[in-house]
Structures are given as C-alpha cells and as structure tokens.
Image: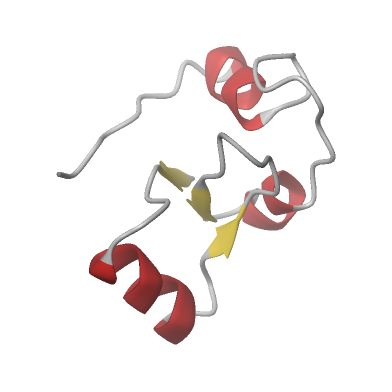
Amino acid sequence: MCLLSGSTGALANWILKNRPEFGRTAHPIYSLMVWGKDAKMLANLNNIDAFESYSPFGYMYKFDAKMAFLM
C-alpha cells in the first residue's frame, strides 16, 4: 500500500493523469494519492473527520504505516 501526499505539482499531476492504478482520496483538505491493494477502498472513503478511525490517517495508524514526503 502506498499513500502519497501530493496535492499539487507537476509530478503528482503526471502520475494521476498517466498511471490509472493511482487514485486520490476525496477529503477536501487532506487528499492523498493512493496505490496498492486497498487503494480503491481508501479513494472511496466518505470521511468527514480527517483523523477518525475510518479515514486514510486512521488506516495508517491501524497498520502502523509510514508516510514519506517528496519536496
């Protein structure tokens, strides 16, 4: 599973346009690019609170995930 924080920029836009296996979560502030076995589930979450257990951040907490930022 891969969660990427890339809301703007040429690389994020290129990935979303050219790599259909990547998706984007729907949260208006904390939108993440997702890829991997649970990507569709994460992209389809309808979470209101960004940090609740039923959110991408809740998923990362539950599975002790790590997050990387590219700048």
Quadrant, the C terminus: top left
Q: Pick whichever, 42 or 38, lies toward us.
A: 42
For residue 26, side relative to residue 64 (left or right): right
The quarter holding residue 46 reads top right
Q: Residue 21, relative to residue 50: is it above or below?
A: below
Residue 31 in percent (x, y) is at: 56, 44
Relative image position of residue 39 (x, y in whole percent): 62, 53
Which residue is most to the bottom? 18
Percent across and percent down for residue 42 are 69, 45
Left or right: 2, with 34 as reference point? left
Number of labels in the image equals: 0
* Residue ID at (44%, 23%): 65
Q: How is the image coloured?
A: secondary structure
Residue in view at x 75 percent, y 19 percent: 49
In this rendering, is residue 65 above or below 42?
Answer: above
Residue at x-position 69% and y-position 52% = 43
Residue 56 in picture, x, y percent from top left:
62, 31
Whether residue 58 sits left or right of residue 8 in the image: it is: right
Q: Quadrant of residue 14?
A: bottom left
> Taking 35 as reference, is 11 above or below it?
below
